[in-house]
Image (cartoon, rainbow, N blue to C red):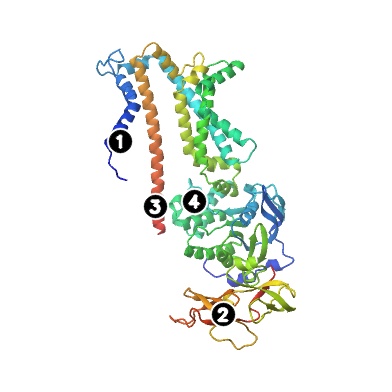
Amino acid sequence: MSKSVGPVKRKFAPWLDPNAKPYIRFEAVTKRFGDFTAVDNLSIDIYEREFFSLLGPSGCGKTTLMRMLAGFEEPTEGRILLDGNDLAGVPPHRRPVNMMFQSYALFPHMSVAENIAFGLKQDRMPKPDIEARVAEMLKLVKLEKFAGRRPHQLSGGQRQRVALARALAKRPKVLLLDEPLGALDKKLREETQFELMDIQYELGLTFLIVTHDQEEAMTMSDRIAVMDLGRMVQVATPAEIYEQPNSRYVADFIGDINLLEGRVAAVEGQHATIAAAGLDRPIVTEHAGSAKAGDTVWFAIRPEKVRIGLEAPTDPSLNVVAGEVWDIGYLGDVSVYRVKLPNGTVVKSTLANVTRLVERPIGWDDKAYLSWPRDAGLVLTS
Amino acid sequence: MNRRLSWFNVTSLTLGFAFLYIPILLLVIFSFNESRLVTVWGGFSTKWYGEMIRNQALMDAAWVTIRVAVLSATIATVLGTLAAITMTRYVRFPGRMLFSGMIYAPLVMPEVITGLSLLLLFVAMDFSRGFWTVTIAHVTLTMCFVAVVVQSRLVTFDESLEEAAQDLGCPPAKTFFAITLPLILPAVVAGWMLAFTLSLDDLVIASFNTGPGATTLPIKIYSQVRLGVTPEINAVCTVMIAVVAVGVIAASLYTKRAQVEKEKAERAAVLQAG
């Protein structure tokens, strides 16, 4: 349970293999509730054993998408395929997927063991087998001592584990998790994230998780789908989403980012120079994306990739801008400097506090130089 | 807010309770009267209870009343629960407003009108009046009360419990009996008891729709009182009061205890989680 699965998972990338068969396939799915379009012409392929996250703000359609896979909603248009079979018209109780509900939805009139056994009883599994499976599940979620308790006699974290055990008991090929850690406090949430990853790996399951917590999605997922207003904005691995967001929406939704508006002065392959209003030197970047000369674009750079210093760096290949320290946030492990440029834009720079100093050398209202290498940022066109 | 009772509070409370309970108290006291005259105290005796039991007509009426009440409350509970589920679950269907209005109309409908219209229906259908017509009439009367009680419980029912059951492979009909019904059972039982009590003491609707051999206790009491109140009637009424009071108290103690235990367990869980 506790061993790390990192290196194994890193090689897992069936979405790059053109011959790989998707396990779950959403094909041009649209769902409308009256005039409201919750999911808008959306297609995704999810592969076997993948840990896939649907990430987005509330109301972006991510829960609707999951409920359509579970069978609680039918798509207005499009098809959902599971292992090649069209799921249209199959009622929830005949679908080989199980769901862990956001509210946990534990049956209050049944004990922990009865809750876990519920799904197995529906399959008419022989009694000794049910008992063995329940015991196995209780062991998996470390609740052996609580088998006879009722849900209201458990803490929030214990309830979450029962819900997980109940959803896993039938050994579904796909487990759907709706905001599984939303009700837990921060520390418990972090622990449970790793436990979920280990369980998913050990049992060889496909996990589809809905969350609005970007940290949760980043930690656990093989791939993340960022959604907005019923559409898929970007589907990629956590690192790709973070380092190569395809739009300002994704860049801003995942982590912190500085956006500088400007016009493309020249492009040559991926090498581009961008003139930003109010800055005396153009920004040079090696990640021009699809920008063309003359386009209005946004230069995006993460705060931890912006270096800050009191003296101008001498390396001519660096982008350098001067500004005034506007605000400092000391978070312990890092400090966040908000520097106001001559054109009024505030750029954030985070600096790891690697030395044990109580007095930091950079203070309020100091004139500071921000610098970054040419490959540290990227150009966004939308 | 630990204010003391002023003389005004005490007086209004006393008057209020006196107004409510003195007539009932008098009735109970006079059921133990030795004298044949209802308003003259002639010493303590339980002889009228003996008379009551030996009065075959009265006992027959009581037996009819209980049968009608049990049967009509059970039918009303089934129909009322189904109506409540439809009203809370299927939020959008054509004519929903009309349907919900029609379910609740009998709550405020004058009993005379309900009774008379049912009588006209039974006459038109050439349905011979008796035990079954009274039972059907009481179902009509009490179903809306059951629907109101059950609906108030269903409004707070977490529908994801049903979805979870179906997700785990339980077909919808089985889900109702395995998950929904056990959880709304207290409301269903309360609805049944309400329907039972309403049927037990209904005079107006029953007297419109009764027939030979189906005289209920309220009808019997009413017709006897017109010939003069006997202490025997007081005894019957006292028994009825006792039955209803025991039922109501038992039901409220039961729900109260369940609530207290649930809260205690929840506190324990929170403490343990630390």
Chain under disc 4: A
Residue picked out by circle 1: B9
Question: Which numbered disc, 2 or 1, marks the residue closer to the eye?
Answer: 2
- Disc with the residue nearer the chain's start (2 vs 4): 4
Residue picked out by circle 4: A113
Q: CA distance from mark 3 to mark 1?
A: 37 Å
Q: Position of residue A19 (x, y in %)?
A: 74, 65
Q: CA distance from mark 3 to mark 4?
A: 22 Å
Question: Which numbered disc, 3 or 2, marks the residue closer to the eye?
Answer: 2
- Identify residue type, mark 3: Arg
| A342 relative to B64 in the view: left or right | right
Q: CA distance from mark 1 to mark 4?
A: 54 Å
Q: Secondary structure at mark 3?
A: helix
Q: Position of residue A215 (x, y in %)?
A: 56, 66
Residue picked out by circle 3: B267
Q: Secondary structure at mark 2?
A: strand
Question: Which numbered disc, 3 or 4, marks the residue closer to the eye?
Answer: 3
Q: CA distance from mark 3 to mark 2?
A: 56 Å
Residue picked out by circle 2: A323
Task: Please tell me how crowded label 1 is: few (under 14), some (14-19), or many (20+) other residues with Cα within 10 Å.
Answer: few
- Disc with the residue nearer the chain's start (3 vs 1): 1
Q: Name the quarter where the C terminus of chain B is drawn.
A: bottom left
Q: Secondary structure at mark 4?
A: helix
